[in-house]
Image: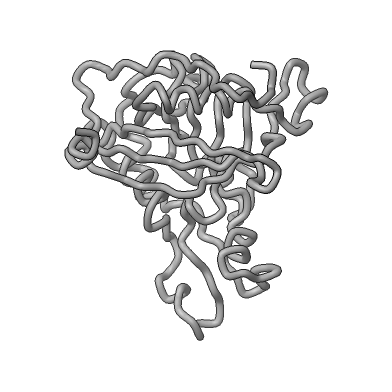
Amino acid sequence: ADGKLRDAPLTGEAVPRLPEGVEITNVVTIDLSIGKKTTGGETGTINLGLYGSACPASVQQMLDFCTKGILTSSKLMLEEGYGVISAPVKLTEGGGITMLYPNKRLDFGIASQSVSYAKMKRLNKAGEDFVPQTRPTSKEVDVISKEPVVRKHDVAGLLSIPSNGIGYGGSGLDSDDEAYGSSFQITAAAVPGMDNEKRRVIGQVMDEESMAVLARVASLPTKKGLKGVIPGQNAGPPLLRVTVNDISVKSVASAAAASE
């Protein structure tokens, strides 16, 4: 927990116990890249099990974000010649850890949709005709916000989203371009304050190897961030950039079959 990378992996916290009566419906595998490959960067994988039976709308939104992307605009905006350009916002296009609370929680998202779009299209910038995806509609928010609280943020390895779902994290004052900068978080320790923030747990880390990667990433040093502004606060973007390389999703049945 000294903010240094090691040759030997850190030992992670225990894998969270599955709450009684809760089932894992999907496993999301997130492949991460830490630092630059040209300067000795490394990779790590985190497997997340989702509570699809307990909170189906929240889990479906998470699955969309990790696969096809979240689309709140008209599909016509994705077509050439419409006058504007846009793209679904998804974690595999420019996603990564946008904020790190050392040894407490990791915040994943898309810092800027326009920057991610430009990189995807190999452009210097997205251009004035680029329109980012807005936050999900009030109808979707209404369904997600009414789903039950499955468990408290009382251990490491829990997948947490804002009370209104993905797209409603951050300060609340973020522009549409930055709306998905704080999409979901993973706890690296018990963080009771996340309950007070009315965040909800929709899944958990699945295995010891993933918990070790979580501990390793959570111990990274951060950029200055809020240090010195709020006493005792040292949160900020990780000093070594942590990006999402790839994501795969399996139903719990196919995931179990693959491990046999």
Horizontal and vertical percent position of residue 194: 51, 22
The one of 94 and 220 positioned closer to us in this rendering: 220
Q: Is residue 14 left or right of residue 50?
A: right
For this orientation, the residue located farthest to the right is 228
> The C terminus is located in which quarter?
top left
Q: Residue at 60% across / 25% down in the picture? A: 7
Q: Quadrant of residue 224?
A: top right
Residue at 66% from the left image edge and 45% from the top image edge: 36
Q: Is residue 220 above or below residue 43?
A: above
**Looking at the rendering, in which quadrant would you find the N terminus?**
top right
Q: Is residue 126 left or right of residue 260?
A: right
Q: Residue at 53% of width from left, 39% of height from top?
A: 43
Residue 156, relative to residue 139: is it above or below?
Answer: above
Percent x, y for residue 244?
52, 46
Looking at the rendered structure, the number of numbered marks drawn on it comes to: 0
Give the residue drawn at x 50%, y 16%. Answer: 11
Percent position of residue 54, x then y: 24, 30
Colouring convention used in this rendered image of the protein: one colour
Residue 196 to residue 249: above or below: above
Q: Position of residue 86 (x, y in %)?
A: 52, 69
The foreground one among 34 and 193 is 34
Is 210 in front, or is 56? 210
